[in-house]
Amino acid sequence: MSTLLAPTNAPALPRAAIDAKLVSLVKTSAIGMGVFLSGFVIREPAPYELYMVGLIAVWALAGLRISRRIAPLLTLLILFNVGGAISMSQLADLGTIPLYIAVSLFLALTSVFFAAAVEAEPRLLRVVFIAWVMAAVATAFFGILGYFNAFPGATLFTRFGRAAGVFEDPNVFGPFLTLPAIGLLYLILVARPLVACLAVPLFLVVAGGIFFSFSRGAWGLLAVTAILLVLAVFLNSRTGLSRLRVSVTALLALAGLVLALILALQIPAVADLFFERARLAQDYDSARLGRFARFGIGFLWAIEHPLGIGPLRFGQLLGEDTHNIWLKALLDYSWLGFAAYLTLILWTLTAGFRILFRQRPWQPYLLCVYIVFVGHVALGTVIDTDHWRHFYLLLGLLWGMIALEQKHMRAALLRDAPGD
């Protein structure tokens, strides 16, 4: 017995293996923290910017590699910002405009960074999703508490009487929550019962944050992306039983959301703001110089000014920003920037769609990210997504997975090639 209880000398892990595990843990934690901080942008510069500047610099010194598969993303984003510099040259007084373009370039670099990181280590996708969900639940929770003024000072987490969480603008807060909501909905549809049940309360908190943001764009984004996700998962299911589960679960989720909406509308203040915001066209949309009229004016200016009119100049002249990413690209980033942006979006949509239903370890992440990205592209026609941090994160994740597919196909070709 004493012999059995005596300590034995277990073989020690090689020092290289310990170092590799430590490096992997540091990388995972660093990426997770960066994504988590993207959900806290109540003031600018936000902690996200300061943190990501250091993270990108350290990772670059540690050997971050931008492959030829990621190079087109980098090239098009640089051209987009070169267009911004060209447009900036049309201004007599630059003021803070160089800082604006610098932020644009920085956000572009974060997109390239996440793409390169995912291509190098696909396991980081899980880390990104977990961190994003954690940030979404936290900021949505604060937003809901703020909307109901649940404690002294809770209104810090609201803007214009709407939930904004730890964001400056409810119209950015709502769309930020969409990918976590779609990711959690995916788990509810396909995960094991225990995991699906755990995802339900998190989904309700995030969906509640979107609802109380009273952002029409965020409402539409969640509705459209949820429908697209259910359709994609249904088509991707291989058995009749799994398709039945998706159908039944989707119907139950819809019934639950409708019930939650009915209960929320029993609160008079909620009902009043809901029906006011639910109108398709607000006064500031259809007024003489409302959003739609400004679109027409802006596109006429874009035709007359191929070099742009200068970043942020449109809002100074007409009192409101463009609220249209395509118009903003034309006026703030010149024809060159618009061409680069259009090429980037079409390239991303096409390359992502081609691989959307291929059975790969990263396919669940690809489905969720691609669908939400499509929604953001559509949303860009009625709102300016130019400096949305999470949009660049979506873009980087997509390009990282597109690069992973290219690597996978190349490896398969080499493996199947006949020997000499």
Image (spheres, helix red, strand yellow):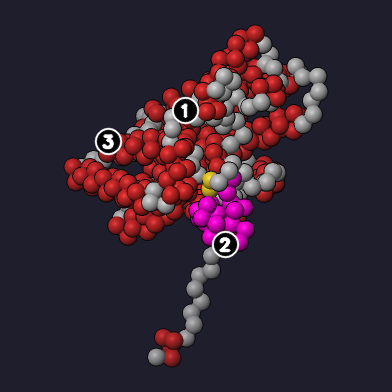
Magenta residues span 141-159
One can see residue 61 in this view = no
Q: Position of residue 43 (x, y in %)?
A: 68, 46
- Residue type at mark 2 is Phe
Q: Position of residue 364 (x, y in %)?
A: 38, 43
Three-letter code, disc 3: Leu
Q: Position of residue 185 (x, y in %)?
A: 37, 47
User: What distance separates the C-alpha of mark 2 from that of mark 3?
Assistant: 46 Å
Q: What's the CA distance linking mark 1 and mark 2?
A: 34 Å
Task: State the SS at label 3.
Answer: helix
- Decide whether residue 150 is among the magenta residues: yes
**SS category of the residue bearing label 2:** loop
Quadrant placement of the N terminus: bottom left
Residue at far bottom of view: 2
Lateral position of residue 291 relative to residue 93, left or right? left
Indicate the amino acid at tag 1: Ala
Q: Residues within 10 Å of mark 2 (few under 14, many from 20)?
A: few
- Residue identified by numbered label 1: 281
Q: Earlier in the sequence, mark 1 or mark 2?
A: 2
In this rendered view, identify the residue nearer to me: 56 or 248: 248
Residue, x 52% and y 28% (percent of image)? 283
Q: Residues within 10 Å of mark 3 (few under 14, many from 20)?
A: few
Contact? badges 1 and 3 (CB < 8 Å): no
Cβ–Cβ under 8 Å for marks 1 and 2:
no
- The residue identified by callout 3 is 235
Residue at position x 54%, y 68% in the image: 12
Q: In front: mark 2 or mark 3?
A: 2
- The number of callouts visible is 3
Residue 151 circle label: 2
Question: Vertically, is 252 above or below 16?
Answer: above
